[in-house]
Amino acid sequence: MKWDDFDGEYMKVVQEKTSAKIQVYCPTRLQRFLETVPRNGTYILAKNRTQHMGKRQVQKRVEDIRKAIGVLSGQGRLVPHGWRYTAATQLADAGVDMRDIQAVTGHKTLSMVQKYTAQANQKAASRRAQTAREQSRNETGKR
């Protein structure tokens, strides 16, 4: 990504699988981090002032970071391919609308968003149902 792709709030990205061009709002923590990165060239992840890092270089750096923080293997393992799934699940857990999740993940269809968020939706729906049940019992008991 080029620095020109980031306007301080939004990042212009191309979703790799679908080639969809979207603008994704950057969470505050990412905005703050990018504010600390020196703008010494065209690219955010750069080999030098005019060349971006290659895909393999980026993958290696991500692997090194995963190893350093203890999430390269084992039960707490984080896999880059799964990060979009994780984001979709976290958004669904927060009660975000499917179309809004689609705007973040870049999925072309709502059915794919539903596939990614099915487990989170089930979990949230279970909580809503049990909470409603408890509230109903409490209101009935008060009468």
Image: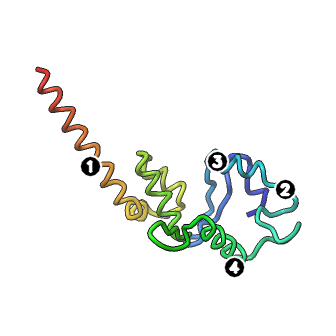
CB atoms of marks 4 and 1 within 8 Å = no
Q: Going 80% across and 64% down the picture, which residue do you hit?
A: 43
Label 1 – label 2 distance at C-alpha: 47 Å
Mark 2 highlights which residue? 39
Sequence order check, earlier mark of 2 and 4: 2
Mark 3 highlights which residue? 29
Decide: few, some or many residues near mark 3? Use Cα within 10 Å; few <14, some 14-19, many ≥20.
Answer: few
Sequence order check, earlier mark of 1 and 2: 2
Decide: few, some or many residues near mark 2? Use Cα within 10 Å; few <14, some 14-19, many ≥20.
Answer: few
* Quadrant of res 56: bottom right
Tell me the kind of residue under disc 4.
Arg
Residue 88: x percent and y percent? 47, 57
Between residues 33 and 24, which one lies in front from this camera angle? 33
**Horizontal side, residue 123 vs residue 72: left or right:** left
**Above/below status of 78 relative to 124:** below
Give the label on residue 126, or none: 1
Residue 102: x percent and y percent? 49, 56
Q: Going 68% across and 46% down the picture, which residue do you hit?
A: 9
Labels in figure, total = 4
Tell me the kind of residue under disc 2.
Arg
Label 3 – label 1 distance at C-alpha: 30 Å
Sequence order check, earlier mark of 3 and 4: 3
